[in-house]
Amino acid sequence: MKPSRMGVRLCLLCALAPVLAFAQYADLQLYKDGQAALDSLQWQKALDSFKRLSPESAQLAGALYWRAFALDRMGQRKEALAAIGELRTSYPGSGWLGDARTLETAIIGNSGSNAPPRKEPDAETRLRALADLARTDPGGAAAAFRDAALQPNLPGVRQRSLYDLSRDDSPEARELVTQVARGVSNPDLQSYALSLIGRSDAPALPGLYAAVDEDHKGLILAILSGNRDKDGLAQIAGGEPSEPLRFQALISLVDVGTDAQVAALLQTEKSADVRNAIEAAQASLRQWVQTQLTALRTSPDPKARRSGAIGLARGGNEAADLALIEAYSSEKDQDVKGAIVFTLTQRRNFAALEDMGRKETDPMLKQRIGLAIGQNRAK
């Protein structure tokens, strides 16, 4: 039987995944290097990093914006406007166009196309000034953080200012972070805002899902998976028309959800390729979990038991949690018990950890459990 297009795509993605992942990592590192150079006012170094991105890089539109930003700071405003024009032509639907228009207006407002390079403080100096303002004038600091985050500025200053706004409990600050998450700023800040909301107000993410583009939908699914939010993933998987995104939601649900949730969604899944791929992933995961459970329960070797406990951080339903809790109560080896604490933390079973912490008499393990619970409460 001839394989379907979806089946072929899945096979190709699996085969090419290591190569694609390496190329994407290399491009992302170059992009981050360029942004770090901007933060330290090393304009030419930043330009060199952005120019080295591969033609397939997901960061090309952002790199064009930052090239324009750097050229403007170098006094090469004609070249900066040309970079903005290239961004507008090559990426007509890019989320960077709003920032580009703001930068373009500022460039045109300056006299002369090749004015001398402007002198300005680096990111570290600006952030210190904002921190001082927050201490001496908290009321005025919120507006300063807002302007620093949304106006043309060094990337590190924008990100840190958005972080500081996310820590402000005022309705105005929360609404601004939500608007950035919806896409009122550039894609980099949008991704960062979504990650902040994922840590501080994760239940809001499924509600934001419909408001963002496909790339950021994938990011929300990844955040929900990292948070082990099985209900959020199931909600999205049940209503997502895009096959690749639905597959991402379902494959994440295989790892963090319940068999019943996945089975219910597969009953209404119209794509045979998605259904077959998910069922194969379930079978593979069940085999993996059973191997880890066997090692945890029966191996005489503490290293094997520890490996089995850590292995259960990936996948497994409530039965795996129960097995970990049972193993902890009878385990004598401190390293194995520490591995179980680690895995239950990864699985976000803090109710079990709190119960274990109340019963634990070993000071080191009690402290470790307390730290895990404290980090969760601090989120």
Image (cartoon, grey):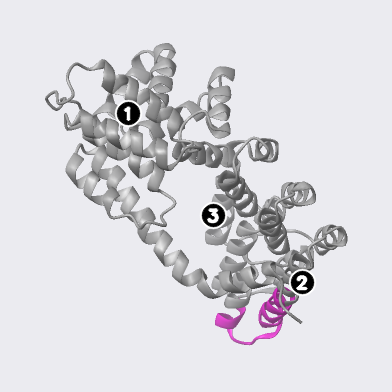
Q: Amino acid at mark 1?
A: Asn
**Amino acid tagged 2:** Asn
Q: Position of residue 146 (x, y in %)?
A: 43, 21
Can I make out residue 233 in this image?
A: yes
Q: Residues within 10 Å of mark 3 (few under 14, many from 20)?
A: few
Report x, y in % for residue 72.
Answer: 23, 30
For the point 76% across and 82% down, which residue is it?
1
Magenta stretch containing residue 304, yes or no?
yes
Depth-wise, is mark 2 or mark 1 nearer the camera? 2
Q: Secondary structure at mark 2?
A: helix
Q: Amino acid at mark 3?
A: Gln
Determine the CA span between mark 1 and mark 3: 43 Å
In the rendering, which numbered label is found on residue 153?
1
- Choose between 156 and 13: the one closer to the eye: 13
Q: Residue furthest left?
A: 116
Q: Secondary structure at mark 1?
A: loop
Task: Locate residue 369, reporting x and y percent.
Answer: 59, 55
Tag 3's secondary structure? helix
Provide the residue span drawn in magenta.
284-305
Q: Quadrant of residue 117?
A: top left
Would you place residue 333 above or below residue 228 in this image? below
Magenta span contains residue 270: no
Q: How far is mark 2 from mark 3, CA to CA? A: 45 Å
In the image, 112: left or right of 309? left
Q: Which residue is mark 3?
A: 367
Q: Looking at the image, do the residues carrying marks 2 and 1 touch, with CB atoms under 8 Å apart?
A: no
Q: CA distance from mark 2 to mark 1?
A: 48 Å
For the stretch drawn in magenta, what is the main secondary structure? Answer: helix
Who's the residue at 30% across and 20% down the image?
Answer: 106
Circle 2 is placed at which residue position?
A: 276
**Numbered disc in front, either 1 or 3:** 1
Q: Vertically, is 315 above or below 46?
A: below
